[in-house]
Amino acid sequence: MENEIAFNHFVSVENLTNDQILTLIHNAEGFKNQTRKVSLTEPVYAANLFFENSTRTHTSFDMAERKLGIQVIPFDPSHSSVNKGETLYDTLLTLEALGVQLSVIRHSTNNYYESLINLNDDQHLHMAIMNGGDGSGQHPSQSMLDLMTIYEEFGHFDGLKIAIVGDITSSRVARSNMQALHHLGAELYFAGPDYWYDPQFDKYGKHVDLDDVIDQINVAMLLRVQHERHAGDENEDQFSATSYHEKYGLTNKRYQQMKKKAIIMHPGPINRDVEFSSNLVEAEKSRFFRQMQNGVFMRMAMIEAVLRGNHLGGLQ
């Protein structure tokens, strides 16, 4: 089969090559238009361990696994032995003993996966790990579906002007996307409150006022204000949804200033009338629902690559 690609794990986009990204996009497009078929000749068992709330990512991975013919083993963190003090490693060791070969994990701890894939000499976990989001670190599958959506629209990345707007410091989506898009040659702008911006992002793009670039950009990537990650942030007590929307959100006025063929993206869930005027969520330039649709097919491509990397399902 053409465009074969293999990974032992899929936890970050940081070290992906441009060729690897494009191969994953093409494979996902193949799944979407039904020209790519993968037939498992051996059973594969997967578990989705989501220790943070999720609708899109959790359900999308579940759907992708089922479309590939993988048998999904239900796992509910709220009723697991994690609540008795069991470590994540021991939980996976248990699932492996029961026959689970692939785990998709979302966890509040940044880089939680490091201790699961870089084992000590006395550890013997043999399981493929896919990162469904770690704290404010990485969200590789969201980044990849975003890249697919942009590529589907423009056919390239080089020279595209893309604004990442909002609660950037808290956003694992922003971190993954700025790394990947920078490598792919996009011109990045960051906009939003100064107190939710970190100068470390300067190596990827420019921090600007959204109104200064709104008529120039090809893509506006809006980020959810993540109130749950703002514990101890004095700005949280002064937050005003109305004020935020006026200063940094996609208002109807800003929408009208955008290029005719520009698109708007958001990882979800959307805080309506905060990041996004409610009446624009389904507007002509919005790709919010396209992103969710593409998520299933991109996750199929990512899972296939991990299956190949671990010789699971009879795939070599």
Image (cartoon, rainbow, N blue to C red):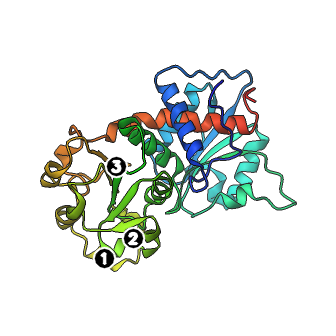
Q: Position of residue 29 (x, y in %)?
A: 48, 29
Q: Residues within 10 Å of mark 2 (few under 14, many from 20)?
A: some
The residue that label 2 is drawn on is: 230
Image coordinates for residue 4, horizontal then vertical, percent: 66, 32
From mark 2 to mark 1, how far is it between C-alphas?
A: 8 Å
> Label 3 sits on what residue type?
His
Q: Which mark is residue 266?
A: 3
Q: Mark 2 and 3 residues: CB-CB less than 8 Å, in contact?
A: no
- Residue at image x 34%, y 62%? 189
Report, in whole angstroms, how far the alpha carbon at label 2 lies from the one at label 3: 20 Å
Judged left or right of residue 314, residue 177 is left
SS assignment at label 2:
loop
The residue under label 1 is 235
Q: Check disc 1 and give the amino acid type.
A: Asn
Identify which residue is drawn at 21% across, 37% down. 284
Give the mark nearest the N terminus, 3 or 1.
1
> Which mark identifies residue 101?
none
Q: Secondary structure at mark 1?
A: helix
Quick one: 117 or 92, which is closer to the camera?
117
Say which amino acid is labelled 2: His
Please tell me whether residue 80 is drawn above or below residue 151 in the rendered image.
below
Q: Are marks 3 and 1 in contact (CB under 8 Å)?
A: no
Question: Relative to residue 313, is residue 295 depicted above or below?
Answer: below
Is the Cβ of the residue at disc 2 closer than 8 Å to that at disc 1? yes
Indicate whether 101 appears above or below 133. above
Q: Nearer the viewer, residue 124 or 16?
A: 16
Question: In the picture provided, is 303 more to the left or to the right than 205?
Answer: right
3 or 1: mark nearer the eye: 3
Per the image, label 3 sits on a secondary structure element best described as loop
